[in-house]
Amino acid sequence: MPISPESCCGPCNNAARKTIAAYEQALETHVVEVDEWIAGGQHGACPPAPEEPSVDPTPGEPIFCGRCKGLIRAALLDLDVLASELAARSDGHRGSIQEGRVSGSRGSASPSPTADALDKLYGFLADVEDEWRGACGYAPRINRTHRGAHPRSRTIGWLSEHLNNLLADEDHIKSGLDILRWETVLRALAKEEPVGSVSPIRCPRCATLRQVVREQEHHWACRSCGRLIPDWEERELRDKQGRELEHRENDLVSGAV
Ligand SMILES: [Zn+2]
Ligand SMILES: [Zn+2]
């Protein structure tokens, strides 16, 4: 939701939104206090009005700011990875991994919460693609895909190609925010790190160790320097730094001999 017509609708303005909501709450409380003061015969000074906070929301470009657009793009690509992982996992539970075929939850005898969520995710993504194709006058969505490619991956690919224009359309503010929400849902299903948990990585900016914490569902932040790290980057760094550590340990071992 925009704070003003020019402000970014994304999570960067969550703090500003909270500040404004708190101020509006304080205004309501103040009205009650003044009513009580009047009803009580106006003894003493009138309760002071809350001070208007100065908020400086990030502007949208034109709807989401560059950083939030990046977060949404990273979340969209994450959905593909997370959904494939979850699908593979839930297939594993059923013990029915089929070569060259991607798990469909439809027709499964015992629908799991994961399969259910993945169905709904695909429905959401396909709806956004259909709407955007309709809005732009493009040909309808093609469901047939190459062998092995899931329609979900194809739709995510299509959406990521059109994401910049989509996120500049005010009818699709919710689509952008829903992409972020879906990532949260899939992460919860995958039981990934909750908010506040510490990542083992070294901060890519200040190189401090164990200061990168999950700040929000789709990104991390360094407690030392404030650097924001989207999920995909955190995962890359985790992988890269993990391999470097392995090398160092191997060097140490071989050096000690
Ligand atoms: Zn923003
Ligand atoms: Zn840092």
Image (tube, helix red, strand yellow):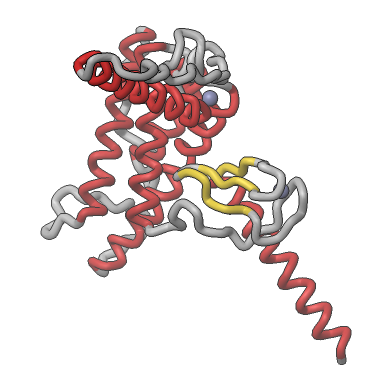
Q: Position of residue 248 (x, y in %)?
A: 79, 73
Is 71 on the left or on the right of 49, as rendered? right
| Picture quadrant where residue 39 is located | top left
Q: Position of residue 61 (x, y in %)?
A: 56, 14
For the question of whether residue 129 can be seen, the reply is no
Q: The N terminus lies in which quarter of the figure?
A: top left
Residue sitting nearer the eye, 32 or 158? 32
Q: The C terminus lies in which quarter of the figure?
A: bottom right
Q: Position of residue 211 (x, y in %)?
A: 65, 56
Residue at the far bottom in the pictured view: 257
Q: Position of residue 97 (x, y in %)?
A: 31, 63
User: Eyeballing the image, is 169 above or below 85?
Assistant: above
Q: Write the residue at 42% across / 18% down.
A: 48
Residue sitting nearer the eye, 173 or 239? 173
| Picture quadrant where residue 228 is located | top right
Q: Write the residue at 29% across / 60% down.
A: 90
Count of all numbered marks drawn on residues in the image: 0
Residue sitting nearer the eye, 132 or 235? 235
Q: Write the residue at 70% across / 60% down.
A: 209
User: Eyeballing the image, is 51 above or below 216?
Assistant: above
For the question of whether residue 226 can be seen, the reply is yes
| Picture quadrant where residue 80 is located | top left
Residue sitting nearer the eye, 194 or 248? 194
User: Eyeballing the image, is 179 above or below 105?
Assistant: above
Q: Write the residue at 29% across / 53% down.
A: 103
Is 209 on the left or on the right of 32, as rendered? right
